[in-house]
Image (cartoon, rainbow, N blue to C red):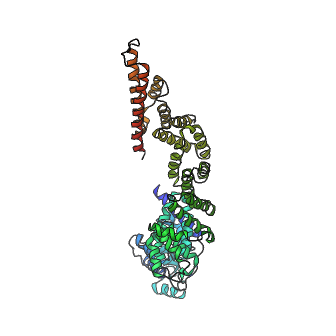
Amino acid sequence: MRGRADHLAAAVALAALLLAGSARAEDAPDTAAASAAEQVREAGEAARRGDALPAGEAAGHGGEDHVEAHADGDAHGTEAAAGEGHGAEGEAGHGEAGKGEEGAPHANTEAKHGETAAGEADGHGEDADAAHGEAAAHPEPAPQRGPQPYEVIRSLQFLQDQAARGNESANRVQARLLQWYGPAFQRASQETWKDPRNQRAAALFVLSGGPPSVLRMILAKNDFPPDVRPLLDGALAYVENRQKEDETMLSALDTATMEPGLAAQVNLALAQMQEKAAPDKALERLRRVMLDASGTLLEEAALRLGMALAEQLGEHARADDYARLYFARYASSIYAGNFRARFTALYVARPFDQAEETVGLVEDAVARIPLVDQVNIYLSIGRRALVAGNMKLAGLAGARVLDVRNLSQAARQRALLYVAASTLTERDTAETLASLEAIDREILHPADRKLFDAAMGVLGEIRKPLMAAAEADPNDPADTTSAAALDSSVVDRATKLLDAVRSDLEGMDK
C-alpha cells in the first residue's frame, strides 16, 4: 500500500510539473545538469564493460545525495517532485520524465542503461575505440535548465489545490517540493530575479510554507526594484512572525492591482493577523480571498476562518452560508477535520432555546456530504452539547442519528446514550434507567463510557431520596422528607453531579 501511495505521489508531482510549462535552454550550461550527463555516460561505459555499480549510483540515482545535487543546481524538475519511485515499476514513466519539460538529462536510468547508454551510444557493443568514435560524431546536446521559480510555484499551487480535494499524496509531495527547490531558488542568478513572475514567486514560496531562510538568502544576494521590496520584506516578516512589521508592510500593498493568486495569498495572511484585533477587517479580506481564489486551497482556508469570524461578529446567516459552501466544495479536504471541529463548536454554542432551529441549519449544511459523515457530525454535536449543558440539542442530535437506516451498532449506542443522558432530570427515572441499561457499555468509546457511568451515578442519587420518601410519614410535620424538600434536594444533587460530569468531559474534549 505504501509503494502504491508513493507512485501516486510521483504521478501527481509529474502532472504538476508538466502543467508548469515547458522549459527553455539557459544561456550558460547548468553545472548539475552537465554532471548528470557525465554520470549517464559513465554508467553506460560501466554497463558495456560488465562492471557492477553500487546500488543507487547508476546514472546519478544516488538517493538523497542525488536529489540534493539536482535541487541545488536547479537542473532537476519532474523527477525531484515525483519523490521516490525510481524502481522498475515506474520505468516507463521515468523515461518520459527524463526527456520531459524540465529537460533534465536523465534519459532512462533503470535497467535499460546497459542497452541504451552502452548499446546505442557505443555502436551496439563494438570495441571501446569504435564507441568513442561514435560518441565524438554525435556530441552531447547542450544541457537544459530546470524550472524557473514561477513554474515551481505553479506546480506547488496545483498540489495544494489537490490537497484541498483530499489528495494526501499531493500534500506529501508539496512538502518535498518546498524542500527540494529551496536551494535552487537560493542559487538562481540575478537575471532570474529580473522576471516579475519570479519576483512574485519568491514571496509565494515562503507564504506557501517554504523555509524563510530561502527568501532571506535571496534578498541578501540580489537587488530588487524598490516597488518589489515591500512585498518580499513583508512576506519574510510574516513567516518569521514579526507581526508589527509584516502587517505594516503587507497592508500597505494594493492587492487590487496584483494578479489574483498573489492578492489572495496576501489577503489571507493579513486576515490571519487581523482576526483578533479587527475581525471585521479580517472577514472582509477573507471575502476577497474567496473571490480571487475560488476553487483553491486559499478559498478552503478562507471559508474555515470566515465561518468562525462571521459567527463571532453575530452574522449568523453568513456563517451558515460559509458552512454550506465549505461542505459543498471541500468536504474531502485534508483539513476538513479541522473545519468539522469548528463547525460543531459553533453550532453547539448557538442559543439553547434555538436547539430545533440549530439542528435544521446543521441538516441543511451537511445535506451534500456522505451519510456516514453526517452521522459523525451529529454524534459530535450530541457529545459537545452535553459538555456545554445544552441538553435539548444533545437529545435532538442523538435522535437525528437514530433516524438513519442501517446505522452501525457503535453509532446507535452512542446516540442512545446522548438521548438518555439529555433527559436525566426530565423523564421518569425508571424509563431513563431502562434506556441506559439497554446500552452496551463495552461498545462505547472510553470517553462515552465515563459519561455512561456518570449518568448512572446521577440516576442513583436521584432515586435515593425517592426511596426515602416512600418510607416517610406525610402526617408528621417534623419529617424533613416532605415533597418540596425532596424536590429541592434532587435538583441540587443532580445539578452538582451533571456539572462534575461536564467538567470531566470538557477536560477530555480538549
Of residue 454 and residue 435, the one placed in the foreground of this image is: 454
Q: x, y percentage for residue 183?
A: 45, 75
Q: Is residue 506 visible?
A: yes
Of residue 69 and residue 449, the one placed in the foreground of this image is: 449
Asked if residue 303 lies left or right of residue 439, the reply is: right
Of residue 397 and residue 247, the one placed in the foreground of this image is: 247
Q: x, y percentage for residue 408?
A: 51, 37
Tell me if residue 204 comes above or below residue 419 in the rendering: below
Of residue 79 and residue 161, the one placed in the foreground of this image is: 161
Q: How many marks?
A: 0
Q: x, y percentage for residue 239?
A: 46, 67
Given the current orientation, which residue lies at the most extreme top position? 475
Question: Which image quadrant is residue 192 in?
Answer: bottom right
At 51% from the left and 57% from the top, the residue drawn is 168
Tell me if residue 195 comes above or below residue 55 in the rendering: below
Q: Is residue 99 visible?
A: no
Given the current orientation, which residue lies at the most extreme left position? 478
Q: x, y percentage for residue 205?
A: 51, 70
Tell me if residue 135 comes above or below residue 105 in the rendering: below
